[in-house]
Image: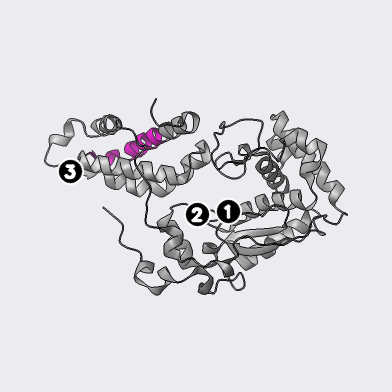
């Protein structure tokens, strides 16, 4: 029922300060991807602005710098696997996904390097960069006012993110943004602004060239154990009342055949645990419900399904997956829009 303790917890690595792990970009799978991204920059005419790459705790660009932070766990396969085990969601799970994040972060670099956020038209298109920035946001899925790039309707989080997402779409190779967003006039206008702006900046040196780093991997004193912690997430905010939904799903998937000894039921809790990684990623992509919250919700549902002895006939597994996906998506949408899973 529960995952085996990570082998990292049984080794010195778990307690070693991250700065002492010897992590660098050189010689890793990230190195050729960064070279490929630099080629993408040249292809769109960005030759006078050269970002600095470094490893840190998460993706990001410190304000008024041109330094792009890349999650340290992407530098080694074993650390990537550990992050998947502990968090369940990897921002940069393969080459294409890493490039996707690099394009987004490069949007921040361009914004800060040329102080676009002070431009009157930038403010008109995206809003004021001084708008309060909060990790919590309630996106409107499928809004035609914003582009789609990173999962979770990320452009809707803040004007700075709206620009970064718009820039990323603009520079994505082989993407015809005019056709893709032709029926979305507001998003299309933002992309047209990005296109005009980048053409105007082609031969301009950046105004900001600072490469001050925020939490460089070589300075991180805490260990992997401290970084990940031991709390898998609290279920305190999960409401009672979900048992009935689970029972309704699995009652429909057993039927009268369940009383026959020739039919054995597969445990519903095991199925929910197996679906966890894909549901976390896809629910976040299409609803904006954070993966860490979806993980807590799924583990609660799996535990309740086990305690309620819920199961399904093997040949009805596809139906069980569809029903569970629909339930979790509906709950996630409630939380995004209302701040709670149930009214």
Query: Measured along the vertical axis of the image, is residue 113 above or below residue 222?
Result: above
Residue 258 as seen in the image, left or right of residue 28: left
Query: Is the residue under label 2 in contact with that under label 3 (CB below 8 Å)?
Result: no
- Secondary structure, mark 3, is loop
Which of the 4 quarters of the picture holds residue 33? bottom right
Q: Residue at x 54, y 66 (%)?
A: 220
Query: Measured along the vertical axis of the image, is residue 26 above or below residue 294?
Result: below
Query: Is the residue under label 1 in contact with that under label 2 (CB below 8 Å)?
Result: yes
Residue that label 1 marks: 97
Query: Measured along the vertical axis of the image, is residue 242 above or below residue 24?
Result: above
Nearer the N terminus, badge 3 or badge 2?
Answer: 2
Q: Residue at x 76, y 36 (%)?
A: 123
Frontmost residue, 93 versus 174: 93
Residue that label 2 marks: 90
In the rendered structure, which segment of residues is drawn in magenta?
A: 310-328
- Secondary structure, mark 2, is loop
Q: Nearer the viewer, mark 3 or mark 2?
A: 2
The residues bearing labels 1 and 3 have C-alpha atoms spaced at a distance of 41 Å
Query: Can see residue 173?
Result: no
Residue 117 as seen in the image, left or right of residue 268: right
Residue that label 3 marks: 264
How packed mark 1 is, by other alpha carbons closer than 10 Å (few <14, some 14-19, many 20 or more), is some
Q: Nearer the viewer, mark 2 or mark 1?
A: 2
* Residue 16 in picture, x, y percent from top left: 45, 72
């Amino acid at each position: 029922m529960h995952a085996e303790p990570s082998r990292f917890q049984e080794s010195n690595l778990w307690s070693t300060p991250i700065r002492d792990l010897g992590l660098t970009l050189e010689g890793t799978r990230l190195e050729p991807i960064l070279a490929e991204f630099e080629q993408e920059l040249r292809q769109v005419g960005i030759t006078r602005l050269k970002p600095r790459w470094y490893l840190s705790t998460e993706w990001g660009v410190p304000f008024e710098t041109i330094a792009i932070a890349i999650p340290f766990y992407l530098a080694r396969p074993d650390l990537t696997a550990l992050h998947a085990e502990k968090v369940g969601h990897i921002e940069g799970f393969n080459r294409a996904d890493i490039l996707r994040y690099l394009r987004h972060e490069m949007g921040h670099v361009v914004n800060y390097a040329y102080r676009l956020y002070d431009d009157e038209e930038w403010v008109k298109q995206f809003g004021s960069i001084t708008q309060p920035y909060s990790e919590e946001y309630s996106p409107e899925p499928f809004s035609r006012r914003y582009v789609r790039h990173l999962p979770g309707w990320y452009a809707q989080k803040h004007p700075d993110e709206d620009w970064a997402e718009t820039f990323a779409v603009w520079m994505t190779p082989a993407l015809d943004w005019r056709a893709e967003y032709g029926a979305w006039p507001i998003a299309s206008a933002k992309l047209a602004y990005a296109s005009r702006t980048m053409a105007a900046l082609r031969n301009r040196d950046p105004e900001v060239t600072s490469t001050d780093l925020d939490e460089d991997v070589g300075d991180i004193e805490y260990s992997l154990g401290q970084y990940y912690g031991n709390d898998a997430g609290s279920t305190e905010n999960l409401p009672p009342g979900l048992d009935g939904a689970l029972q309704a799903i699995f009652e429909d998937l057993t039927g009268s055949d369940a009383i026959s000894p020739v039919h054995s039921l597969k445990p519903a809790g095991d199925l929910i645990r197996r679906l966890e990684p894909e549901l976390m990623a896809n629910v976040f992509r299409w609803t904006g419900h954070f993966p860490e919250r979806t993980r807590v919700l799924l583990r609660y549902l799996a535990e309740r399904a086990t305690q309620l002895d819920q199961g399904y006939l093997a040949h009805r597994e596809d139906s069980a997956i569809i029903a569970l996906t629909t339930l979790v998506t509906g709950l996630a949408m409630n939380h995004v829009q209302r701040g709670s899973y149930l009214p």
